[in-house]
Image: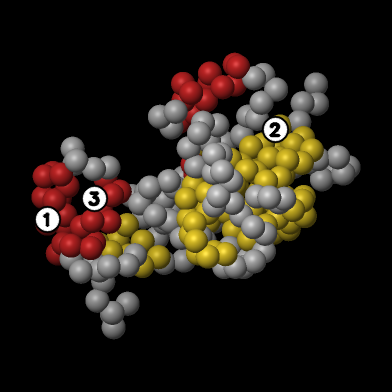
Amino acid sequence: MKSNSWVLLEFSNMGFLGKLFHSRDLPLLAHFLLLFYKEKPLDSLISHFRMLLVQESPILCKPFLFYHRVSYTAFDHKQKATALQKKNADGPNNPPGAVFTDMQVSDVHFPWEAYTLDESFFWTHNLSIGNHLTVILNHPANLSRVQVITGSIVDGRYALEKGQVELGYEPEGVPQHCTSFALLGHLSEGQMDQEIHLKGMEYHVSCVRLVVKAGQAGGLMIRHIYLWEKNDK
C-alpha cells in the first residue's frame, strides 16, 4: 500500500475489530474518541475519523483476520432472545458461531445481526453474483431445519431476488472455512424454510451459507438466519 495514501486499513468488516492505523495518527485518534465517545458508537467514530483525514472509502484487506465468534447470548439482546425462546419452545436456537461475508458492510446493521434471535438485521447493497454470508459454527451441529428470511417485514422490499442456501462440512484452516458444501434449497420470494430430510445431510454441519445467484442493484435486508438443532433424545 506504499503507493497509495491511506489512513485506515481494515482486516475485518465487524465493527471496530481489526483496524490498522499509522502510529503517527494514534494521538489524534485518541483525542477524537475522548471528545465524541458520548455522541456516537466507537465504530461510527472510527469511520468518521477516516473520512476527516480524507480517506473517503474503506479499504478492506482480504482474507479477513478477525471475526466475531460468540454466542448470540453475549450481545445486548440477551434478555430478548431468552424471552423469545421461552415463548416458543419449538423455536430456533442458533448454535454459537462466527458470521462473515464478502458483501458490503455499512456503519450500522452488521453481518452478525442476521444470526440473532431478535428483530435486528444485516443491511447491504449492490450485490454481485457469488456474494455470500456464511455462518461458521463453533462446533459441528446436527440440524433439523434452516430458515432464511430476507426483505422488509412490512412490504417485502429489499429481498434477495435469486439466492440459495448451502450446508458446509469438514472445516479446516485459520480462520476456519468449510471444504465442502451441499445445496439445501433455493429462496422463493426472498425466503426459504427447509426441514432437512435427506439422510446424513443434517449431521455434523459446520457452515450455513447464503449465496447470491444473480447481480442485484439497490439494498438487501437479511433479517434472519434461523437454525434448529436436531433432538436425538
Mark 1 residue element: helix
The amino acid beneath tag 2 is: Trp
Q: Is residue 131 visible?
A: yes
The tag on residue 27 is: 1
Q: Residues within 10 Å of mark 1 (few under 14, many from 20)?
A: few
Q: Earlier in the sequence, mark 3 or mark 1?
A: 1
Distance in Å between CA atoms under marks 3 and 2: 37 Å
Distance in Å between CA atoms under marks 3 and 1: 15 Å
Q: Position of residue 46 (x, y in %)?
A: 25, 53
Q: Where is residue 2 in the image (x, y as percent from the top left)?
A: 28, 80
Q: Kindly identify which residue carries mark 2.
A: 228
Residue lying at 14% horizontally and 64% vertically, measured from the top left: 24
Q: Which of marks 2 and 1 is nearer the N terminus?
A: 1
The amino acid beneath tag 1 is: Pro
Distance in Å between CA atoms under marks 2 and 1: 47 Å
Q: Kindly identify which residue carries mark 3.
A: 45
Q: Position of residue 51 (x, y in %)?
A: 23, 63
**Image quadrant occupied by the N terminus:** bottom left
